């Protein structure tokens, strides 16, 4: 994506005081004269910032303003080891709210909507971000937090929630409960705002049908404000991102070089206006591509594709790179295969074995054909031969958190 003059100006402005304000970047960029950075090509030579660098700065090493200007911190949940702490100024919180309100407007929310928020409240950014966006918009927030499905459904019905905010796994769980209990008629949901983990078209259609709603993918990460830095529109062809607050790049995760628009790689984000903890070329480890051209919705904001997975999810088997989105795509094109699946990679007798578990509604004696079909289509699309295992719907685990799809048991 071409860097705009506005973005270059913001970056130059950031650079004019970055080393002075941030001990973290003063150290990292000590051999670089930032006043020399004048073009996009110059910019693309600057070092990346990675999550490990942020961890090393624990607890408040990223802070780039005096203590008196920090109004809040958030923390990203490290699955292992030290968390990352991000300080926010009043303006950072406000800017995040503006972006979140913009997301809700793009999804068509109005002041009379009632928004049930199921992401968690606490150190991480999810719940409180959804909440502030609702309040800025002027709609009604129903701050449930995660879990307690009985209570979620009771409030959803009694308060006539019109919008549900959830991870895709939790939205799936709720939609299955609503179907099972036969309460769809007393649920008033119209829209779902779904956290942007990778989810297949089939799962999306199932949630949309079972809940009777339109779905929107919202994107974000704690290191860069939180959720709300982009959302899909009615045309469901990618995620519009707020490029007046952030600069987006897509790189080859192996070489670190920028890839052309349309090509899948790792999303890298630079904050243009953040005060508390500005980040330069932050590697998100999310796989996506920049979608060239304009969206039929008429929005001037550029688009990235729906997140195709994590660079960490990319696995190499028999010399082939694969990531979850490819399995989603193949399985969603096979009648009889449902949206939930798991890929297991094992090393047995000196070779790699890939087993694909997928859910189906077909009775056991009718599954052999379907399994054969899965093998052929995966071979054609990903160039790897798999062992297919059809299982009953509900056999594979659901969770309120993000769902792992590929399990590499080789090491
Ligand atoms: Zn659009």
Image (cartoon, grey):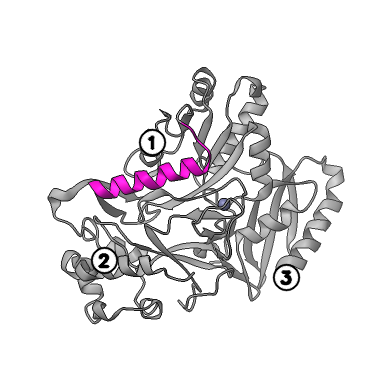
Instruction: Name the residue rendered at 36%, 37% in the picture.
Output: 132
- Badge number at residue 301: none
Q: Is residue 367 above or below residue 50?
A: above
Instruction: Name the residue rendered at 48%, 32% in the picture.
Output: 110
Q: Is residue 2 above or below residue 153?
A: below
C-alpha gap between disc 3 and disc 1 = 45 Å
Judged left or right of residue 344, residue 152 is: left
- Determine the main secondary structure of the stretch shown in magenta: helix
Q: Nearer the viewer, residue 285 or 34?
A: 34
Residue 97 drawn at (x, y percent) = 35, 43
C-alpha gap between disc 3 and disc 2 = 46 Å
Give the residue pinned by disc 2.
14
Region in magenta? 89-110
Give the residue pinned by disc 3.
383
Instruction: Name the residue rendered at 59%, 56% in the picture.
Output: 295
- Badge number at residue 131: 1
Q: Nearer the viewer, residue 375 or 382?
A: 382
Q: Secondary structure at mark 2?
A: helix
Residue 189 belongs to the span the image colors magenta? no
Q: Earlier in the sequence, mark 3 or mark 1?
A: 1
């Amino acid at each position: 994506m071409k860097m705009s003059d506005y973005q270059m100006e913001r970056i130059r402005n950031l650079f004019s005081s970055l080393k002075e304000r941030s001990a973290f970047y003063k150290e990292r960029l000590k051999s670089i004269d930032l006043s020399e950075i004048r073009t996009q090509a110059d910019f693309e030579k600057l070092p990346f910032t990675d999550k490990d660098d942020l961890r090393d700065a624990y607890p408040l090493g990223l802070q780039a303003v005096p203590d008196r200007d920090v109004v809040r911190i958030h923390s990203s949940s490290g699955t292992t080891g030290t968390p990352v702490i991000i300080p926010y100024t009043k303006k950072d919180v406000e800017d995040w709210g503006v972006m979140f309100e913009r997301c809700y407007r793009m999804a068509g929310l109005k002041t009379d909507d009632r928004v049930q928020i199921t992401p968690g409240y606490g150190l991480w950014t999810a719940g409180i971000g959804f909440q502030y966006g609702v309040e800025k918009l002027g709609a009604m927030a129903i701050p449930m937090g995660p879990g307690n499905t009985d209570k979620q459904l009771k409030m959803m019905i009694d308060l006539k929630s019109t919008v549900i905010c959830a991870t895709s796994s939790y939205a799936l769980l709720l939609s299955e409960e609503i179907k099972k209990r036969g309460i769809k008629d007393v649920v008033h949901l119209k829209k779902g705002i779904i956290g942007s983990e990778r989810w297949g078209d089939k799962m999306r259609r199932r949630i949309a049908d079972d809940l009777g709603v339109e779905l929107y993918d919202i994107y974000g990460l704690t290191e860069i404000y939180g959720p709300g830095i982009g959302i899909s529109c009615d045309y469901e062809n990618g995620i519009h991102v707020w490029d007046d607050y952030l600069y987006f790049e897509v790189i080859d995760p192996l070489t670190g070089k920028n890839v052309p628009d349309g090509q899948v790689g790792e999303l890298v984000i630079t904050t243009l206006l953040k005060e508390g903890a500005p980040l330069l070329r932050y590697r998100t480890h999310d796989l996506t591509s920049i979608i060239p051209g304009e969206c039929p919705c008429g929005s001037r904001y550029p688009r990235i594709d729906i997140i195709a997975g994590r660079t960490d999810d990319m696995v190499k088997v028999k010399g082939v790179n694969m990531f979850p989105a490819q399995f989603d795509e193949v399985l969603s094109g096979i009648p009889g295969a449902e949206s939930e699946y798991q890929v297991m990679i094992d090393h047995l007798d000196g070779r790699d074995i890939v087993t694909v578990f997928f859910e189906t509604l077909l009775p056991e004696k009718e599954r052999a054909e379907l399994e054969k079909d899965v093998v052929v289509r995966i071979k054609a699309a990903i160039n790897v031969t798999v062992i297919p295992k059809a299982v009953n719907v509900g056999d594979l685990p659901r969770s309120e958190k993000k769902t792992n799809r590929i399990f590499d048991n080789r090491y």
